[in-house]
Structure formats: C-alpha cells, structure tokens
Amino acid sequence: VIWGWLPALLWVAIGTLPLWSSIQDDIRSGDVAYLLPRPMSYIGYKLAEGYGRMAARMAVLGVVSLGGAWLFSGSLPSAPLGLLFAIPLALLASCVLVIFYAWVGLMAFWLQDAQPVYFIFQKLLFVLGGLILPLSIYPDWLASFSAWTPFSAILYGPAQAAYQAELTAVVWTGVRLLLWGGFATLLLAWTYAKALRGLEVNGG
C-alpha cells in the first residue's frame, strides 16, 4: 500500500491547486472587471497561475511522499517501472484537473458561490476516482460506470500504473486523460464565452 495506489492518488488530489476559489474571489469582489481588459485572456492567466502553483506543490509533495514511502517501507518499490509510468500520468491528470477546477470557479458568475459545485465535483472525484476505496473492489456495474467518467482517469489511472505497470493500461489511461482534457478545455472555453456575453448584456 505504501508504494501502491494511495500515494499516487493523494499526490494528484492534494498537489492540484483548487483554482476555483481564486476565480470565485475575483468574481465576487469585482476584481474580474479590472482583469478582463488586460491583453492576456483572464482565464488563460488563471490557468497559467494554476499550473505554476501546481508544479511547485507537486514537486514538494513528490519528494516528501517518495521519501516517506521509502522511510516507512524500508525499501524501494517492488515495481519501480510503475513510477516511471505513474509520474507523467499524474502530471497530465493534474493538468486536466486544473481545467475542471477553473470551470467550477466560473460557476460563480451565475451562482455567486461555487462551493456547492466544487463539493459535488470533489465527492464524485473521491468516490469514482478510487480515493476512498480502490475501484477494483467496487461492484462490476459501478467500476464500469466510473471508467466512463473523468474521475477514474484522473485519480485511479495514475495510481494503477504505480503498482501495476501494464503498458496497455498506461496507454489507455493516457488516451482517456487527453480526451477528457480536450473535453474540459472546450467546456471551459464555452462557459467563459457565455459568461463574457452575460457581462456585456448586463453592461459589465
């Protein structure tokens, strides 16, 4: 377990900056009105901020978690090749998660408080992503359903690679992350454009 699925899951879940709160604060305080006229896209600026902080957090957490796993287990992982697969998959998963968090933050344009949306998204991430229990022990119908969601690709996919370095599963996880990343990007762009149109209509 120390070198297994849980450290990889926590690395992605904890290392990814909850960008939604920063976007929500800009919207609720009105600061977004001063940031929108800048030459750089507001949402592009927030994503760059999120990725920069994510890289710093994951670098520190990665060193701490690997060192802690080595200290508590007293040995290197039994399948070190899995880490070579899990690390890039976890970084890609975190990038996708940042995009989804940015989308959650944009909900504040309509709801003023995006925390309920984040709460639902987080709980789905924990349950369908395998953070609470490994998806391998779920009932077949629930495991199959979770495989069609972004949550299992974001959390369970990199974690599975850490202890079960099967090339087919690794490639499939990478493909799913790229597909969900594309979907999240399109969803974010559409939501952002809709929010801007709403501001223009209301004279914002």
Image: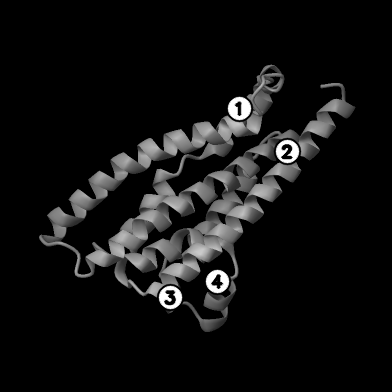
Residue 93 rendering spot, x and y as whole percentages: 47, 54
Q: Is residue 46 above or below residue 157?
A: above
Q: Is residue 49 above or below residue 63?
A: above
Residue under pointer 3: 168
Q: Helix, strand, or loop for circle 4? A: helix
Residue 69 rendering spot, x and y as whole percentages: 20, 56
Q: Is residue 56 above or below residue 160?
A: above
Q: Residues within 10 Å of mark 2 (few under 14, many from 20)?
A: some
Q: Residue at x 69, y 20 (%)?
A: 30
Q: In terms of sequence position, does the residue under pointer 1 or pointer 4 come before the other? A: 1
Q: Is residue 88 left or right of residue 200?
A: left
Q: In terms of sequence position, does the residue under pointer 3 or pointer 1 come before the other? A: 1
Q: In terms of sequence position, does the residue under pointer 2 or pointer 1 come before the other? A: 1
Q: Amino acid at mark 1?
A: Asp
Q: How far is disc 2 from disc 3 in space, using C-alphas?
A: 36 Å
Q: Helix, strand, or loop for circle 3? A: helix
Q: In this rendering, does residue 117 appear at all? A: yes
Q: Helix, strand, or loop for circle 1? A: helix
Residue under pointer 2: 192
Mark 2 or mark 1, whichever is nearer to me: 2
Q: Amino acid at mark 4?
A: Ala
Residue under pointer 4: 147
For the C terminus, the quadrant is top right
